[in-house]
């Protein structure tokens, strides 16, 4: 009887501890979602055309900010076809990139300093582009405002999905990954639509995989750094085995300049 009582107390305590950890999880707290649409896909030369920062609390959208920038260069037709912003419109309606990049970076830094998780699908691209834009325009970069890489509390649904379901075949674009998990993606390739979908996808992944959802935000960020490097190395080996000596970037969430 004593052993049964002791076992019951232990199991009750374990369940309570798990429930407490889940309540403290990033899944149930505040998140800030970020996305940019750009002039191209090279992080070193791409300029931001549109950007969105969305704030969520317990999965509910509570605030949203959008920017249209004049990137200072012509927007290639291929890029315009993706996000729908022409050079003419950007020049006529777009904000100065200095002011916009300062506002975006400042807002994200404010959230990160409050230990709010920053969600970005394929964060390596969006955050590196923002970093390069900041340095290009003399704006203090995000990583410097939050005390270095340890202050970058990023949740990347692309990295999480590749880790949780690593053997699934096929491409992993935002649209395809959202479809796989039954997450709505409305207004695709608009910064606001992509940012919201990324946040909802992150929450779905956290709810689906306890390893992810039950993790402390800071610990999850550190683990993603390792997973991103492993995923890049695996893809690079895949290319090499097929006679394609391509380098796959493993740094995450910002490629060193």
Image (tube, rainbow, N blue to C red):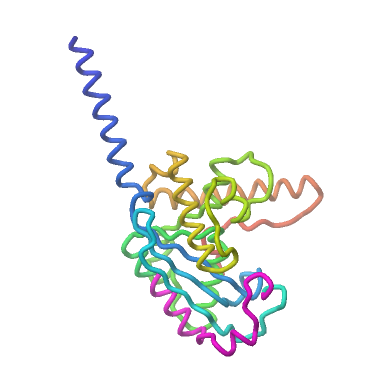
Q: Residue furthest right?
A: 243
The residue under the point 61% across, 48% down is: 231
Q: Position of residue 35 (x, y in %)?
A: 52, 66
Q: Position of residue 21 (x, y in %)?
A: 31, 41
Identify the residue shown where x is 61% and y is 55%: 175
Give the residue furthest to the bottom.
92
Give the number of marks: 0
Q: Residue at x 54, y 70 (%)?
A: 36
Q: Is residue 34 above or below residue 105?
A: above
Q: Position of residue 24 (x, y in %)?
A: 30, 47
Q: Nearer the viewer, residue 36 or 137?
A: 36
Q: Residue at x 57, y 85 (%)?
A: 70
Quadrant in which the N terminus appears? top left
Give residue 187's quadrant in the image: bottom right
- Give the main secondary structure, helix, strand or loop, of the magenta stretch: helix
Quarter residue 50 falls in = bottom right
Compared with residue 126, is residue 154 higher up or lower down, i.e. above or below? Answer: above
Q: Is residue 131 left or right of residue 76?
A: left
In the image: residue 215, left or right of residue 95: left
The foreground one among 181 and 73 is 181
> Is 6 situated above or below 42?
above
Q: For this view, does 188 lie left or right of residue 58? A: right
60 vs 104, nearest the viewer: 60
Q: Which residues make up the magenta segment?
A: 80-108
Reply above or below: 25 against 98.
above
Q: Quadrant of the C terminus?
A: bottom right
Q: Position of residue 120 (x, y in %)?
A: 50, 60
Magenta-colored stretch includes residue 66: no
Confirm whether the magenta stretch covers residue 104: yes
Q: Residue furthest left?
A: 2
Q: Quadrant of residue 56?
A: bottom left
């Amino acid at each position: 009887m004593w052993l049964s009582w002791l076992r019951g107390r232990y199991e009750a305590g374990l369940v309570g501890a798990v429930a407490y950890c889940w309540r403290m999880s990033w899944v149930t707290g505040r998140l800030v979602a970020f996305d940019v649409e750009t002039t191209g896909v090279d992080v070193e030369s791409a300029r931001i055309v549109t950007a969105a920062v969305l704030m969520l609390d317990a999965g509910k959208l509570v605030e949203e900010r959008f920017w249209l920038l004049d990137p200072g260069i012509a927007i290639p037709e291929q890029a315009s076809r993706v996000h729908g912003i022409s050079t003419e419109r950007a020049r006529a309606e777009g904000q100065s990139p200095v002011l916009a990049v300062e506002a975006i970076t400042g807002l994200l830094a404010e959230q990160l300093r409050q230990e709010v998780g920053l969600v970005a699908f394929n964060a390596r691209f969006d955050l590196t582009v923002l970093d390069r834009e900041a340095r290009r325009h003399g704006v203090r970069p995000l990583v410097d405002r939050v005390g270095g890489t340890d202050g970058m509390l990023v949740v990347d649904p692309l990295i999480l999905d590749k880790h949780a379901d690593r053997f699934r075949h096929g491409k992993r674009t935002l649209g395809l990954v959202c479809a796989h998990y039954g997450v709505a993606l409305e207004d695709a390739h608009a910064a606001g639509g992509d940012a919201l979908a990324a946040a909802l996808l992150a929450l779905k992944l956290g709810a689906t995989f306890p390893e992810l959802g039950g993790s402390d935000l800071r610990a999850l960020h550190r683990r993603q750094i390792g997973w991103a490097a492993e995923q890049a190395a695996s893809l690079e080996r895949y290319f090499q085995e097929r006679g394609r000596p391509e380098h796959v970037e493993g740094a995450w969430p910002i490629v060193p300049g």
